[in-house]
Image: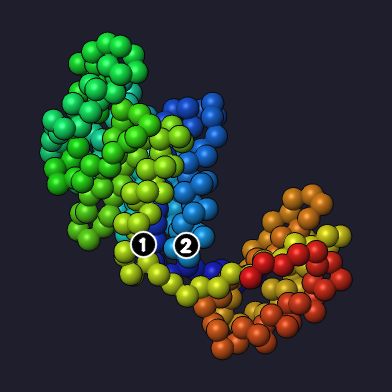
Amino acid sequence: MPTKLVRKSNNNRVGILATGNELTEGDILNTNSHEIAHVLNLHHLPIGLHITTSDDETDMENALKFLLKHHCVIIITGGLGPTSDDRTRFALSRVLHKELIFDENCWQNIRKRIRERLGREAHPTNRQQALFPAGSEIIPNPNGTAAGCFITHKSKMFFMLPGPPKECLPMFTEAVLPQILTRKSLKHNQIKFSWHLQGASEGEIAAQIDEAIKSYPATTGYRFYAPFLEVKIYTHAHDTLDEMLEIVEKIIAPYKVTENK
């Protein structure tokens, strides 16, 4: 019987929750989570689970409660509009047991933006976009009416961002990422190596590498996308690194196209 690997619990990770029926029903791709994870990885921040839910408030609550148990930073995208299906702020408020507080400055910014862009007054339904859990720090949205927010709860960090990528991603880069980078517990010394191979059998190469480095403290991963096979190795062990890489290099040498360290 193969050995079953059990991942140790690690709450020092960033979790991502994307909300919206348009995501769960396949109408659009979840590009926000993809780009946010990519940027976090570039900054060597440990990424945990990605969860996608519908606009159902109960689904969001359940997802947030789960992420709260297993992550120290949670980024939420979507569901901050003025319509009845925009329930993200309400779900977060209930999970954190914090009252939603109306922010007058945010409301005036919404009114101003709608007057300037549409030439009319904001509809009363837009007022819900100025509601935030008590204690929140507002994250301005220069490209839309849906401001985001940052709030801490039991030493955990929560970020709430709008769904449209042209609004979400600039807010993440300018306001969210700098805050996350201040959290020293998220820094880790994991090293990732990857190689692109061509002409290699995925099963055969994986079996050879896994057997050859099974005594080293490392995790392997493989991804085939024609005509290439990507081989990935993750490790925290700096002292045995050169020795392990020499073993891997001998196995993949006949097929190696590129490498990334």
Q: Position of residue 173 (x, y in %)?
A: 41, 49
**Looking at this view, is 210 or 105 the one in front?**
105
**Looking at this view, is 183 or 25 the one in front?**
183
Where does label 1 land, which residue?
A: 181
Secondary-structure class at tag 2: loop
Q: How many marks?
A: 2
Q: Please tell me the numbered disc located at residue 43.
A: 2
Q: Position of residue 15 (x, y in %)?
A: 40, 53
In the rendered structure, which amino acid carries the disc numbered 1? Leu
Q: Is residue 200 left or right of residue 216?
A: right
Quarter assignment of residue 202 = bottom right
Secondary-structure class at tag 1: helix
Q: Within 10 angstroms of label 2, few (less than 14), some, or many (20 or more) residues?
A: few
Quarter assignment of residue 169 = top left
| Furthest residue toward top | 120
Q: Is residue 53 left or right of residue 58?
A: right
Q: Within 10 angstroms of label 1, few (less than 14), some, or many (20 or more) residues?
A: some
